[in-house]
Each structure stands twice: as C-alpha cells, then as structure tokens.
Amino acid sequence: MATFPNVIQPDYRESLSKDHSLKGKWNEEFFRTEKPITVELGCGRGEYTVGLARQFPERHFVGADIKGARIFKGAKTALDENMSNVAFVRTHIEMINRFFGPDEISEIWLTFPDPQEKNRRRKKRLTGSRFLMLYRHFLKPSGYVNLKTDNALLFNYTFALVKENNFPVQAVTDNLYQSDIAGMTYHIRTYYEQMFLNEGKKIHYLKFSIPGHEEIREPEEF
C-alpha cells in the first residue's frame, strides 16, 4: 500500500510525537476541493467508506483502521474506480485526533465496532466517553456520530451514555430493517453485516451529536 496515493500510513512513533501534516488541511492539500468530510472509524475492508463515496460524490470520505490487510481492499477498489473523494488512514483510533483539525469533520460512522463486552474493557469501546472526547476535537458541533451494530450490549450502553449526557438524538432503533428509518443508512451492507443478517440478528442504529466541552459522563450500568 506504500504505493497507493489514497492511503496515509505514517510511522507509529511519528504519530505519537506530532500531528500529521494534513491535520486541518484535508480539503486544501489532499482532496483539493472544499467539500464536507465524513470519517469511518474502524473501517475494516472499507466497504462502507467506498459505498458512501459512490453514493455521495459531493462529499469526501476517509476510512481509518490499523489493519493494512483490511484497508487494502477498499483502497484498491477506490483506485480501480478512479474515485477522487476517498482516502484511507492507517492508524490506531486512539491517535485519530493527530489527523483532523477542529471542526474539520462533518460526520462519523462506526460500523460494527468491537463491543468490548467485558466491563473492565469498556474504556476501549469506540462509543465510550474516552473516544467521544477525542471525536469532539475534530467533529463540527452540528455534526453527527452514526453507530451500526448487531450487539445489543454496545447499543444499549451507547444509548444510555447519550441519554446520561443529554446529547441530541437524530435517530434510534433496535431493529433497523424493520423500522421507518432504514433509508437513512443508505442500504450499504458490509460483509459482516450481511453475515449477521443471514444469522437472523437484528441491526441496531443510533445517530447522535456530541456538542459541548464538559466532561462526558459514563452511565452507571454496563
């Protein structure tokens, strides 16, 4: 992937010590056009990132994941289709604020993240307070976080956290494809989502914003 012009994969030690040169400059220096930017965190094979980019050429999309073998498929598909509105970043999500500046991102997608079911590991959940505080650094105050998951615990935990902090909710359902908001997710189904559906699992969906600057409180349960 080192030869892929649509993949950014800095040295780990470099990311630890300083911000990436594209931080705050994605539209200006990478995409070369001014459009809203959507980020998919933990993008895996990039199916959702590429799928969204196909449907919304008027926006830019960046997928982030630490696994290069996963990113490869999405990055190559975007190159093969000459998609100029797609990029990928290979990094730990804990370092994601090294790559985006204040108010640079309009929307975040979390598609089937690891639920980290053990209570002592909830600090690793991508919808937990630790990560939401990171997202605040670069998500516009009017921007949204989208969560799709087959895991009831992660969904209920995230919804409880959202209610605990009085965050505005745009949409919520514990059975997406039997709801009247299914169209909001654009019917893009990743490999794992289709597998979950084939197993008869329900898909949960939550769309919310995270305005403010105060500390984000964790729910007592979960």
Image: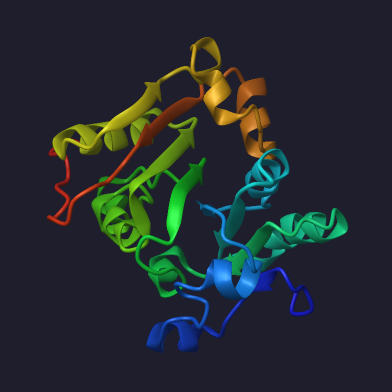
Instruction: Please state the horizontal and vertical placement of residue 203, each as a whole percent of the image.
Output: 51, 25
Q: In the orientation shown, which residue stands out farthest toward the right? A: 80
Residue 113 in view, yes or no: no
- Looking at the image, residue 138 lies above or below residue 209: below
Could you tell me which quadrant the C terminus lies in?
top left
Q: Is residue 142 left or right of residue 77?
A: left
Q: In the orientation shown, which residue stands out farthest toward the front? A: 34
Quarter-wise, where is residue 183 in the image? top right
Tell me the residue at 44%/56% (across/down): 105
Q: Is residue 161 left or right of residue 151?
A: left
Q: Is residue 40 left or right of residue 162?
A: right
Residue 85 in view, yes or no: yes
Instruction: Please state the horizontal and vertical placement of residue 166, each as a whole percent of the image.
Output: 16, 35
The number of discs equals 0
Instruction: Please state the horizontal and vertical placement of residue 21, each as a whole percent of the image.
Output: 51, 83
Name the image colouring.
Answer: rainbow
Q: Is residue 150 left or right of residue 70?
A: left
Tell me the residue at 38%/51% (across/down): 126
Quarter-wise, where is residue 16 in the image? bottom left
Nearer-the-camera pick, 77 or 199? 77
Could you tell me which quadrant the N terminus lies in?
bottom right
Tell me the residue at 30%/30% (across/down): 169
- Looking at the image, residue 16 lies above or below residue 47: below
- Looking at the image, residue 212 lies above or below residue 201: below
Instruction: Please state the horizontal and vertical placement of residue 74, each as a whole percent of the image.
Output: 73, 55
